[in-house]
Amino acid sequence: MRCIERDITMSTKTFASQADLEEKRVSFTQLSEHAWAYTAEGDPNTGVIIGDDAVMVIDTQATPVMAADVIRRIREITDKPIKYVVMSHYHAVRVLGASAYMAEGGEQIIASQDTYDLIVERGEQDKASEIGRFPRLFQNVESVPPGLTWPTLTFTGKMTLWLGKLEVQLLQLGRGHTKGDTVVWLPQEKTLFSGDLVEFDATPYAGDAYFQDWPQTLTNIAALQPAALVPGRGAALTTPEQVQAGLDGTRAFVSELFASVKAGAAEGKELRAVYEQTMATLEPRYGQWVIFKHCMPFDVTRAYDEATGHADPRIWTAERDIEMWKALEG
């Protein structure tokens, strides 16, 4: 595993979120009869479904030690076996805690085939990149087993599971945060787990995004008419009005950022000039959102690539992260 171990400062800005050491307060919120949200003030969320005969976890936390706190909270409510882990996408911060649930008797790690393909293509590089960017989110990283977290079961488009009488749908509703995004839908309870396709008062990370597709994917989510939603980051959304606010905020950020970058690229501006222009445009509205300054260099770089003809995201490596940060913030 490659990991950036030194403190990297570029001009007056610390690289990515290496300086973010503040612990967050965890909440475990019930959204509907069978659905729960593990949230931590803008850190990555985990979803929990407690069915009639088994438990499903959506996104694992970043290490087995961190996942142990999710398991502890589940065990305060039920002793049913944790049979299923769902990866909403492939990013390391979402999947490296999976082994903790397998130790609890887990039977399947489920992901879209597109997510599996991304792990094959870039999983090792992403792992090193993410650990270097945000060490606090990888507490006790030494507890992660060697190698990558691999799905044991994949699907394309749609999969339906039954936890007793509870129907659970795994859906690919379009590309956005990555090309492999999966949402988990409880149609009987109108409750949805969106992964990082939806954020709430938290900045979408878009380094692996498809900006032109993302708004339509959000429209596809809205068409389900969720009454409650667990976003990738931010508080659980427990009313239709809050769900709409989460969808609208994510759509606005993604659309405004891409519009700004696309306009700058069309004028022939270099990446740094486009970045500075886009920061100035978006910061008044979104600057208070969690990890805004962390995400923006990655987001603008990917948007600039897409606007200039790179249809698919380039692989982020620990080395590329630093080069990009120097170019935009140095």
Image: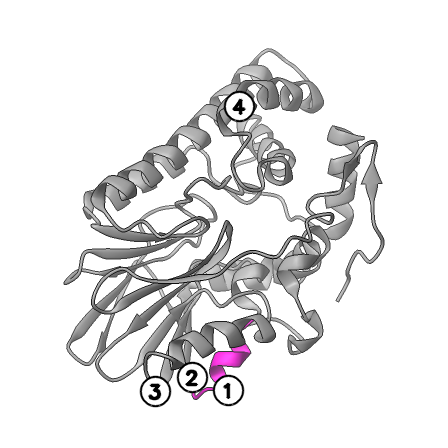
| Disc 1: which residue | 103
Inter-mark Cα distance, 4 to 1: 44 Å
Decide: is 4 above or below 263.
Answer: below
Disc 4 residue type (three-letter): Leu
Is residue 103 in the magenta section? yes
Decide: is 159 above or below 279.
Answer: below
Disc 3 residue type (three-letter): Asp
Q: Nearer the viewer's eye, disc 4 or disc 3?
A: 3
Q: Are marks 2 and 1 in contact (CB under 8 Å)?
A: yes
Inter-mark Cα distance, 2 to 1: 7 Å
Res. 287 image quadrant? top right
Inter-mark Cα distance, 1 to 3: 14 Å
| Disc 3: which residue | 79
Disc 1 residue type (three-letter): Ala
Q: Which residues are magenta?
A: 97-107
Q: Residue at x 40, y 46 (%)?
A: 197
Sooner in the amino-acid sequence: mark 2 or mark 4: 2
Pointer 3: residues within 10 angstroms few (<14), some, or many (20+)? few
| Disc 2: which residue | 106
Observer-nearest of 3 and 119: 3
Sooner in the amino-acid sequence: mark 1 or mark 3: 3
Of helix, strand and loop, which one carries label 1?
Answer: loop
